Structures are given as C-alpha cells and as structure tokens.
Image (tube, grey):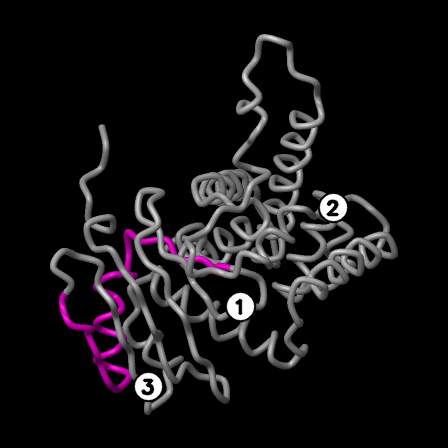
Amino acid sequence: MTELSAAWRDHRAYLVNLAYQMLGDIGEAEDVAQEAFLRLSRTDGIDDVRGWLTVVAGRLCLDQLRSARERLETPLPPDQDVAVAQDPADRVTLDDEVSHALMETLRRLSPGERVAFVLHDVFALPFEEIAETVGRPVGTCRQLARRARAKFTEAAPRPTDVARDEHQRVTEAFIAACSNGDLQALAAVLDPAVWGVGTVLADPTPPPQVNHGPHDVATNLLRYLGPGATVVTGAPGEPVLLAFAEGRLFAVVVLTIRDGRILKIEATANPSARFAPRQP
C-alpha cells in the first residue's frame, strides 16, 4: 500500500466528516476531501499527514464559507430571482430526526466562528493549529470559538469535555471502520452487550430488525454503512450520524455510548435510497 493510499484509508472519513460539519453539504464536503488529497499527492516530506490535511481542508472550507457569505451580502440585480442567493455552502439542512436547534445555530455563525468552533470544540484541535488554518492570531481564534460556544449554549446544553472527547473518539473510530469495511475494527468499538435495532422505511413496513452482540451488529451495519456510503456526524456534540449514498441521505443512526464503547444503535434507513442506481 502506497503512502497516499494509506492516508486515504486512514483519514478520508475523518476529513469528509470535518468538512461536513463546516459546510453542511455532503457533496461539497467530499469535494473538499478530494481536493485536499489531490494537494497531498503533489507534496513530499509531510511528517503529520492528518494535521496537514486538516489545515488544508479547513482553509478550503473557510474559503467556501467566505465566498458564500459574500454572495449573500451582494445586492442582486432587480431581475434576478432572490432564491439564487440561497447557497448550499451557507445552509445546513438535515433530516427531521436531527437536532434542528443546534444546526440552525451553526448556520448563523460567521465563517471564522464556525471553523474555530468545529475544529476546537468538535475535533479538539489546539488553537495554535486553528490559527494556522484561519490565518488569525491564537487569541482571536479563542475569541471566535468563545463567541460560537456562547451561541450554542443558548441553543442547547454542551456536553462536558470528557463526554465530548469520548464521543469524538468513539464516533470517529465507528465512521472510519464503516468507511473501510473493517468488520474487526467496527466490532472493537461495540460493547459486548451491544444491540441494534433498525427501522426500514418501506411499503409495507417490515418488523424492526434487531441484532445482538458485536459480530452480528457489525455485520448488519456494514451491509448498509460499508464502502459506498458516506457517514458523518449529524450535529456537533450529538450522538447522531447521517449516512449518504451518491449525495442522498438514506439513514439516520443514533448511538448510545457508555464507558468508551457503543452500547446501543438505533437506525432508520431507506434502502431504496441507499441502493438506487446512479443517475446518468
């Protein structure tokens, strides 16, 4: 396996998730990750590949957010439809199962606040690295994150730092294992007593699918969330994951985490969206 292939396997899922938290659009998040890896392929001698990719992806997202804001703030010609101003890069629209209050708050953050908050409070990056991404002093980045945090506190209580770090570690491992189709790695983040229940959206609606134990739960998960699907965190600090295929949302997954492992998984899935043929 080449170094680039190893980096793709180890960091792509993380990078798409990071970009999605900033942009709120799965297609754009995947494009950002693709561009970051393209730039990596042209660069030699990087010691911290994950850190380098994080900085590059953060800058790409910040550029998109700023560009979107500029377009929204630019007056439209009289004959131009107002709907054109609604750019996907400055919207966050998720399934009804997801916390709307948190995501609406994220949408209202300035580009700098959004990037600083996501990188620090969601992905636990130090402000020194965030300053390099945002291109502002460390103190300014702290203020940006503090302002964003205050807005989130008004929308919903924040988890403790310990709970946040545990949630981040477990969900990141879960997402990476699904992305790579790694049954062993996926089972490793599941509690020995884990059980999963899946509701399939179909007509007629079949009975809920229930599985018990790491092996059976992981095997069933990879049928839907394995390679070919893109899984991201639904809302900062929330144990909700969203699964996309070809840009279509096809599943919402809620995790219950206990003592560093996943104890319960509740999924609502639409298989017809997951396995729909690619549009020409």
Instruction: Look at the image and give the residue range highlighted in magenta.
Output: 206-234
Residue in the picture at 42% in, 74% down:
255
Give amino acid for label 1. Answer: Glu
SS at badge 2: helix
Residue lying at the far top in this picture: please name it. 79
* 99 displayed left or right of 192: right
Circle 2 crowding by C-alpha within 10 Å: few under 14, some 14–19, many from 20: some
**Image: 99 above or below 239:** above
Give amino acid for label 2. Answer: Gly
Residue that mark 2 sits on? 112
Residue 75, image x, y percentages: 70, 18
Residue that mark 1 sits on? 238
Q: Give the quadrant of residue 26.
A: top left
Residue in the picture at 65% in, 16% down:
76
**Image: 106 above or below 222:** above
Q: CA distance from mark 2 to mark 1?
A: 22 Å
Q: Give the quadrant of residue 72.
A: top right
Residue that mark 3 sits on? 194
Look at the numbered discs 3 and 2 and tell me whether their residues touch, using CB distance below 8 Å. Answer: no
SS at badge 1: loop
Q: Does residue 214 show up magenta in the picture?
A: yes
Residue in the picture at 54% in, 17% down:
81
Q: Does residue 114 show up magenta in the picture?
A: no
Mark in the foreground, 2 or 1: 1
